[in-house]
């Protein structure tokens, strides 16, 4: 049976610097973990919004558009959750998607009514806001001394 010695002090361990750096890397990208779920919920709602707002019959191109954009936002949220250190650089893309959502009723749709415009404007505004928050948090995490340790 192997003898295991438990020491109270780890500072003398030969890999202590590497362990600290790894610990800092693992925790470095999780500053915006609270934004992953709202981003996913926005994507989910965007995908089902044509049926919620009832514009499936008169805005067929916008229905397909909102489903595709909703899936894209949901995939971004999934990426933020699974590989945050790599994906938070795409926060700016989420903001661009939000701006596109705001203007898309007039470009993709045909004679959109107030409900369709309000739906996409609110979704787009929330997407832009969360994208900017994620980008700011990612920039903060990248410049913090903890991330570079």
Image (cartoon, rainbow, N blue to C red):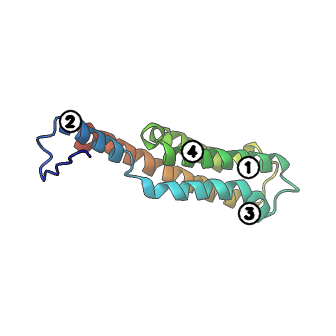
Which sits earlier in the primary sequence, circle 2 or circle 4? 2
Judged from this view, the residue extending furthest toward the front is 1
* Residue of label 1: 67
Secondary element under disc 4, as helix, strand or loop, is helix
Secondary element under disc 3, as helix, strand or loop, is helix
x, y percent for residue 19: 25, 40
Any part of residue 103 in sight: no
Which sits earlier in the primary sequence, circle 4 or circle 1? 1
x, y percent for residue 2: 24, 44
In this rendering, the label closer to the viewer, 2 or 4: 2
In this rendering, the label closer to the viewer, 4 or 1: 4
- Labelled disc at residue 76: 4
Q: Quadrant of residue 140?
A: top left
Tag 4 and tag 1, C-beta contact below 8 Å: no
Tag 4 and tag 3, C-beta contact below 8 Å: no
In this rendering, the label closer to the viewer, 4 or 3: 4
For the point 36% across and 42% down, the residue is: 139
In this rendering, the label closer to the viewer, 2 or 3: 2
For the point 43% across and 51% down, the residue is: 133
* Residue of label 3: 115
Which sits earlier in the primary sequence, circle 2 or circle 3? 2
Which sits earlier in the primary sequence, circle 1 or circle 2? 2
């Amino acid at each position: 049976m192997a003898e295991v010695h438990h020491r109270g002090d780890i500072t003398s361990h030969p890999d202590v610097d590497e362990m600290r750096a790894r610990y800092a890397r693992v925790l470095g990208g999780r500053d915006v973990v609270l934004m992953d779920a709202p981003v996913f919920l926005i994507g989910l709602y965007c995908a089902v919004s044509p049926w919620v707002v009832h514009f499936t019959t008169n805005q067929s191109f916008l229905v397909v558009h909102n489903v595709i954009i909703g899936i894209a936002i949901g995939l971004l949220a999934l990426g933020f959750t699974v590989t945050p250190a790599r994906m938070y650089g795409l926060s700016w893309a989420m903001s661009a998607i939000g701006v596109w959502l705001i203007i898309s009723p007039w470009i993709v749709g045909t004679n959109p009514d107030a409900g369709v415009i309000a739906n996409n404007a609110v979704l787009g505004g929330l997407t832009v806001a969360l994208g900017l928050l994620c980008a700011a948090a990612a920039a903060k995490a990248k410049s913090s001394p903890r991330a570079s340790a």
